[in-house]
Image (cartoon, helix red, strand yellow):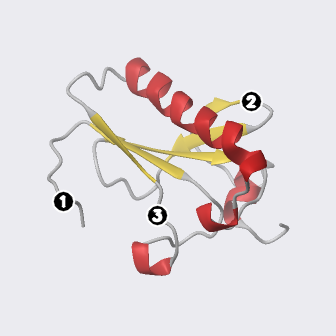
Amino acid sequence: MDDCLFCKISRKEIPAKLVYSDDEIFAFEDIQPQSPSHILICPRKHLPSLAEASPEDAGLLGRMQLIAAKLATERNLNDGYRTVINNGSGAGQSVFHLHLHLLGGRAFRWPPG
């Protein structure tokens, strides 16, 4: 999408602190971090939310989680980390391009939110 913030980051039209990039997925530091380590992991394919993903996207979704685990290891998040996908405005999604939050570097409570 031409006006999507994350699509613009993917195309390098808007600067971001990229921490991972390949042909299908890119990841960058959140500009409003909710933990000491807060990375957003996004598919280059524009999907507004998880609700619009199809069975054909299963591999992509799995790779996003594996990249989160890789980045967590690289950042020494040995005490634990959380991955979150907010789906819809009621769940806190504010940018409507599917993205996975990788959060770590502090203790988390349960239940979240």
Q: Is residue 44 visible?
A: no
What quarter of the picture does the C terminus occupy?
bottom left
Q: Amino acid at mark 3?
A: Asn
Nearer the observer, 69 or 9: 69
Q: Position of residue 41 (x, y in %)?
A: 57, 44
What residue is drawn where x is 60% and y is 61%? 50
**Circle 1 residue:** 111
Q: Is residue 105 depicted above or below 2 in this figure?
A: above
Q: Position of residue 25 (x, y in %)?
A: 70, 38
Give neighbour class at mark 2: few <14, some 14-19, many 20+ (Cα, 10 Å): few
Q: Nearer the viewer, mark 1 or mark 2?
A: 1
Q: Secondary structure at mark 3?
A: loop
Marks 1 and 3 sit apart, C-alpha to C-alpha, by: 15 Å
Q: Amino acid at mark 2?
A: Asp
Mark before the other along the chain sequence, 2 or 3? 2
Q: Secondary structure at mark 1?
A: loop
What residue is drawn where x is 23% and y is 60%? 112
Label pair 1/3, CB-CB below 8 angstroms: no
Q: Which mark is residue 22?
A: 2
Q: Secondary structure at mark 2?
A: loop
Q: Which mark is residue 86?
A: 3
